[in-house]
């Protein structure tokens, strides 16, 4: 059984991530609003919360705490190769989000430097995420698929389910509403 257990969950989570990417036209409108000196701090804070809580604490945590550990146990190196690349992407994403969070209030007050920093980091995150998901789907998961037997797959699925429970009851449902980034960024930026 290929890494279907994680792919099912991962692809569902990727669809929510993809809403971030698909709303690029929304981002463009949002970027235009940023250029004109406006940022809705509530919408920006919601987007940051979604990324930090759902993308990072749910999706990336399952990879880092479950999948990568299992991959290392079957011989994948931690410090180079696909695991190192994914960890680098996760760290890069956190840096983009941290930079956005650091300037939200100043950007909301119309500070031109803060608006530019926010826009550049939102764009950087979006581009990094697009490439990251491709790396997962085209490289990481297929490599893991070849390394895990049916027993490994069942153990991974159980571990992913435990991780979801640890993240908190209803977290997926809570963030499903926020996953519509287009609605977050389009309202008030047209």
Image: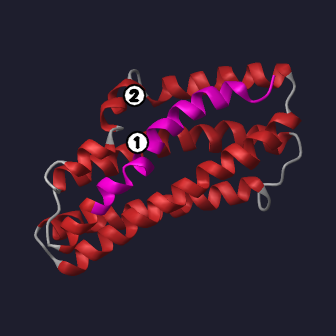
For label 1, the residue is 53
Q: Vertically, is 148 above or below 117?
A: above
Image coords of residue 23 (percent x, y): 36, 49
Examine the structure image and report whether residue 9 is included in the region drawn in magenta.
Answer: yes
Give the mark nearest the N terminus, 1 or 2.
1
Dot 1 crowding, Cα within 10 Å, few <14, some 14–19, many 20+: some
Q: Residue at x 87, y 36 (%)?
A: 146
- Identify the main secondary structure in magenta: helix
Magenta-drawn segment: 1-28
Dot 2 crowding, Cα within 10 Å, few <14, some 14–19, many 20+: some
Image quadrant holding the N terminus, namely top right
For label 2, the residue is 171
Image coords of residue 19 (percent x, y): 41, 43
Near-viewer residue (75 or 8): 8
Q: Vertically, is 139 above or below 144?
A: below
Q: Residue at x 19, y 79 (%)?
A: 112
Q: Residue at x 44, y 51 (%)?
A: 21
Q: Are marks 1 and 2 in contact (CB under 8 Å)?
A: yes
Image quadrant holding the C terminus, namely bottom left
């Amino acid at each position: 059984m290929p890494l279907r257990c994680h792919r099912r969950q991962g692809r569902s989570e990727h669809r929510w991530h993809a809403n971030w990417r698909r709303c690029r036209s929304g981002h463009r409108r949002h970027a235009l609003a940023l250029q004109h000196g406006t940022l809705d701090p509530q919408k920006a804070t919601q987007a940051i919360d979604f990324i930090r809580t759902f993308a990072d604490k749910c999706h990336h945590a399952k990879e880092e705490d479950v999948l990568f550990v299992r991959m290392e146990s079957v011989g994948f190196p931690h410090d180079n190769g696909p695991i190192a690349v994914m960890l680098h992407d996760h760290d890069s994403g956190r840096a983009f989000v941290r930079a956005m969070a650091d300037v939200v209030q100043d950007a909301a007050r119309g500070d031109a430097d803060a608006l530019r920093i926010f826009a550049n980091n939102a764009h950087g995150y979006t581009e990094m995420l697009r490439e990251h998901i491709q790396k997962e789907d085209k490289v990481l998961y297929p490599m893991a698929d070849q390394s895990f037997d049916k027993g490994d797959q069942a153990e991974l699925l159980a571990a992913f389910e435990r991780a979801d429970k640890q993240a908190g009851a209803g977290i997926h449902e809570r963030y499903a509403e926020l996953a519509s980034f287009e609605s977050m960024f389009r309202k008030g930026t047209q």
